[in-house]
Structure formats: structure tokens, C-alpha cells
Amino acid sequence: MSEVVAYTREGNVGVISVNYPPVNALSHAVRAGLVAALEQGQKDAEADILLLVCEGRTFIAGADIREFGKPLQEPGLPDVINAYESSDKPIVAAIHGTALGGGLETALGCHYRVALPSAKVGLPEVKLGLLPGAGGTQRLPRLVGAQKALEMIRSGNFVGARDALALGIVDAVEGGDDIRQVGLAYARKLAAEGAPVRRVRDIADKVEADKGSDVFDQFRAGLAKKARGLFSPFKCVDAVEAAFTLPFAEGLKRERELFKECMESPQRAGLIHSFFAEREVSKVKGLAKDTPVREVKSVGIIGAGTMGGGIAMNFANVGIPATIVEVKQDALDRGLAVIRRNYENSAKKGKLTAEQVEERMALIKTSLSYDDFRNVDLVIEAVFENMAIKKEIFAKLDEVCKPGAILASNTSTLDIDEIASATHRPEDVVGMHFFSPANVMKLLENVRGSKTSDEVKATVMAVAKKINKVGVMVGNCHGFVGNRMLHKRGAEAMALVNEGASPQQVDKVLTDLGFPMGQFAMSDLAGIDVGYRIREERRNAGEDVPASWMDKLVEQDRLGQKTQAGVYKYEEGSRAPVVDPEVEQLIESFRAEQGIVAREVTDQEILERCMYVMVNEGAKILEEGIADRSLDIDVVWIYGYGFPAYRGGPMFWADQVGLDNILAAVKNYNNTVGGEQWKPAPLLEKLVAEGRKFSDL
């Protein structure tokens, strides 16, 4: 008998209990133990019914990540589940915590399922570039029908116990603190009633009802828009469809074929890297696990614009009151109206109730005075990128805020140490760079200054988690990690257009790679004036920032989507970019002014110059310690800039392309294009010379 799975009996209930901390993952030992315990239960003449229950904080929460990439040892999970489903004695799965992936598939192999009200179930394999490969795509549709099965498997999202009961995934939801006792009570009840063995594979009414439905074609059409470039979501639809077109045994066989196709897809490696990188970034290098974290019970926000309002929503969403300060009442009124409109739009979509809208609005206060920040625990400044203004604000905050209050700037590029120099408490100053729209985008780039205390670093990382952001701690330099690399890509994109490419050609190369939008469409979304202010700030600091046709767009009040005209034009009510002949003419005029003769630019050159320049800059960022690990850079780009998760982030992608190939191209562009951005990073040269990758660092 495996030490991680035990068999005991309580009265007439044979109990199979799994104890494999921390999440009872389906390791080889657990799988073997499940089979051995089942055999013992089947032979136990005094056991009328069997109960599968897990110790600790959760039911089986999926595969064992420690076995990823290793040869599979028998028994495989499909065989384990088949053995449970084929049992002659009824088996009850008692679910608490989460039953995810193979955990839910195991529960579906049991004949009955009871859950605590707090439990959640789901099949999240698609998020790793996979599909449920142990019968999930065949059994779940037999309980919930095609539509719901497709929604759950395609999204990978979890379902709460009450919803799972309504859908038919679980048979009962029972209150209680002890899942073992809840499971025993339910099993005894079924035994007393003489409940029969009920195999999910034999349930046919939902399958018959949905045969011939066009739901599969509808889902594929939706995926063409929502999951463009992804592999596994389409295979998920194929697998679920097999449940409605093939006998059960053949459906399982088809599921395994599709599962293997996903396993062999390069997207799987990228998505698994993204999945684990997101979890790893919370561990900040050099920051002790027991570093004290300050309580943040209230926040102040300076600026009621798009960023300030979005930041306030993040805190209101989790019950933390926020006070927004502006210089004029009409700015506050406009900002508050936008926040309300955002919440009411969510309510219209069924994501919030009317009561929740009012609860959240009540948590957001407005003021014209910094005095209302006297007792807040955290202040986030969210005004436009101007160092003089930011230093003036932080000097005021230094006077007003209580000792121990964290003073944060939402700056996207500016020096945190210079901002901190305006205060007498630089140890309490930090960057908290939210991404627009701040109430939607998941990334929070936390920027440590040279004097930022460990306590403050730990606190802002904890705050990120509290407000459901992916926090990444980075160092202080112009643009930090994300924008520093973006500026290099942006400069190359501009140069490519100057030399003869069109903005739409550059954008198409990037969207073909998997980005949701290209460089110029993204500029329009953010507002072209944002980049213009940054360039002006750099020019004012004495930097040699060349003239740009983008500057001319700003001078013509073409600021992007907000003015319905930027690099592209936009129809009323639409965010779809439309090529504008006026901009084409403006670019041609700019080339003439600069004495540039347009040439043909290939898509391959666009790909290399836009992407390899980022990789080279990323290597410099790693060398300088601005990012501690290559995965930090990957997470910044996935969650802040829409880098396709299935490619794993720019540094993971570079490893896949081959650092030797990238270095050769960088050297070529250093010779032909020139500029500091193409000077090969010593770290990149070192890795190539040693035959190593960024992931080896």
C-alpha cells in the first residue's frame, strides 16, 4: 500500500484517503496508491460503499508538476479513472478546496460527488496548451451538455460548488468543516437508500439532446477571433465534439490522440513557462520570506484621469477605500463619472449586481486637498510624465502623510530616486507602474529605488496580489523593464517606416507573431501624446531625440483613438484601425524633408529589428540587475504588453529561436544600421560562447 494513499473502513464505508501535500497532486505514488486502495476496498466484504477523500487543504488539484517532462510511469491516470468508474461498489468523491484538471477527472470517474460550499472545480489544461487527457472532454459533456462543457474546457475557468451543483457536476453541496465527516455522512445516506453504481460514461440524455447541434461550429467561429494563433482551444472543441459523434471508448481514444498533438505543440512549452513564471515572480531575489509587510487599509490617489480612476477601481474592487485628489472639481466629477460608467457596464454584462456597483462607488471618495491623505497607508501619484511636477507633489506628500505611509509613483519611465529626493523619507518611496486600462491590465511593475526599504518592497508586492495583479519587482532606470524595451522596439519601428515600410506592415508582422496589436495601433490606444511628452522630457533633459513624423501628428491634434485619429483613423464607436491616406502623405513628406529615399522592407527584417532589439536590450537589463531573472522580463511583457503567452515571453522566445541566430543578426544590424541599441550585449555574447540560454541563468 502506498504511504500517500491509505485504505480504512468506518462502519460500512470503505475510505480511500489521499495525503500528498501540498495539493494532493497526481504523482505516480498517488496513482499507484489509488489503484491499490481501490482493490482493497473491492475485496472488503464489510464495505458497502467507498469514499474518496483527501487530507489537507484541498482535493486533488491536478498533475504533479515535479513529474513534468519525465517519462510517464504506469498506471496512467486514464487507467486509474477507468478502474474507479468500473467498480462494482458505488464510489463517492468528497470535494473540498479545488478539484482541478486530473483531480476533477478523477472525481468524474466516481459515481457520486459531494462538495463543501467553498469548493471549486475546473479543467484548466488549456491554459498550459493542453486539453483534459483523462476523459474530461468525454465525461463532462455527459453531465452538463455541449455548451457548458465547451465553455468550461475552452476557458479553463473554475466553477464554484453551487454552480457545479446546478450544472450537475456534483450531486450535493453540504456544509461542514470536516470534509471526511461530510463525505462519510453522504456515503452512509446513499448506502441506506441502496443507491446504485452510476457511471458517467453511461449517462446519455445530454449527449442525445445535443447531437447535430451547431454549437461546435459556433465555438470554432468564436475562437477564430478570441484565440487567434492558439492551438489547444481548437483541439478542445474537437475533443468535446467526439463525445457527441463517437461511442465512449472511441471518444476516449480520440481525446488521447488530440492530447498528444497538444503535447507535441511548441505552444505547450511556452504556456507552461508562462504559467510557472507568473508564480515565480512573487519571489523577489534578496527579499527574505519573513520580511514584515505593512497594513494597507486605505489609499490615496493623485489624479482622476484614466489611470487614477482605474487604479482607484482596483482597490474598491477588493474593499479598500480610496481617496482621489485633483486640482479642480470638474476633473473629479469627470473621473468619477467614468468610474461609474465602467462599473455600470460591468453590471450590464452580468459581472456585477447593482448593489455591488453602489458598494464600490461608496468606497471611492474625492477631494481637492492633500490634507485628506493624512491617515492613508499608501498614496499613488498618477499624473502625467513631468519630473518637476512629480517632485513638487512628493514634497507635499512628505509634509502631509503620516510616518510609515508608502509614497508611490505610477511613472512609466522616470527616475524613482530623483522623485524620492524631494522627500525626507526615500526609504518609503517606490514605483507602482500600472498599465492602461489600470482596472483591466494584470501587470503591476513595482520599481525599487536605491533606498527603498525591504518592508516597502514586500508590501507593494503583497498589495499587487491583494488587488489581483501580477506584481514584478524591477530596478530603477529610464523606462524600467517594459518601457525600456518598448522604446527600443518603437524606435526601430519608426526607423523602418522612415526607410520605406508602412505602419500597417510593421503592425501586421507583430500581430502575426501573436501580439493583440502592433506598435502603431498600440500607440493610438495609449495616446500618441504620451510618447510625445516622454520625448519632450528627454529633449528637455538634453538628450538628442530626433524629429519624428509622430510629433507632427500630435501637433495636428491627432492623438490616437481618443481623438478618432492618430497613426490610423477610427470610425465613431469603433476601435478598429483604418489606414489613413493623410498619414501616408505625411510620412512621404517627412521622408522628403529628411532626404530619405524609400526602399522595400521585408517582413523578416521587420521581425528581426523589432524583436531582436528587444532581446538585446533585455540581456543588458539582466546584466545591470534591473531584472533579476529572464522570467521577470517575460512576465512583464506577457501581462503588460500582450506578448503571446504561448511563446513564453521575449527571453523564452529568444531561447527557442536560438541565441546564436539572434547574436549574428544583432552584429549584422550593428554594422549596417548602427546605434547603441545594436551594440551586442556582453551577456548575449557570453551565453552564445558558452552554449547556454537565458533560462540557464
Image (spheres, helix red, strand yellow):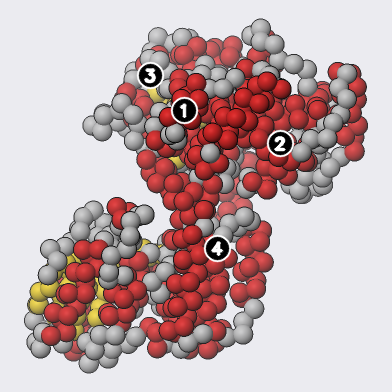
- Position of 574 with respect to 309 (left or right) is right
Q: Residues within 10 Å of mark 2 (few under 14, many from 20)?
A: many
Q: Which mark is residue 233?
A: 4
Q: Is residue 374 left or right of residue 599?
A: left
Residue under circle 2? 606
For discs 3 and 4, the disc positioned in front in the rendered view: 4
On residue 583, the disc is none
**Cα–Cα gap, marks 1 and 2:** 26 Å
User: At 86% from the left edge and 40% from the top edge, which residue is drawn?
Assistant: 580
Given the current orientation, which residue lies at the most extreme top position?
A: 542
Q: Nearer the viewer, residue 374 or 378?
A: 378
| Residue annotated with mark 3 | 452
Q: Nearer the N terminus, badge 2 or badge 3?
A: 3
Specify whether residue 450 is in view. yes
Q: Amino acid at mark 4?
A: Pro
Q: Nearer the viewer, mark 1 or mark 2?
A: 1
Amino acid type, mark 1? Ala
Name the amino acid type tagged 3: Thr
Q: Residue at x 62, y 48 (%)?
A: 514
Up/down of 380 relative to 213, above or below: above
Badge 2 marks a residue whose secondary structure is: helix
Q: Between marks 3 and 4, how big is the CA–CA gap?
A: 43 Å
Label whose residue precedes the other's in the sequence (2 or 4): 4
C-alpha span from label 2 to label 3: 39 Å
Whether residue 5 is situated above or below residue 458 in the rendered picture:
below
Q: Vertical placement of 98 versus 150: above or below? A: above
Residue carrying label 1: 689
In the rendered image, the quadrant that contains the C terminus is top left
Q: Evaluate if marks 2 and 3 touch, with contact meaning CB atoms under 8 Å apart.
A: no
Label 4 secondary element: helix
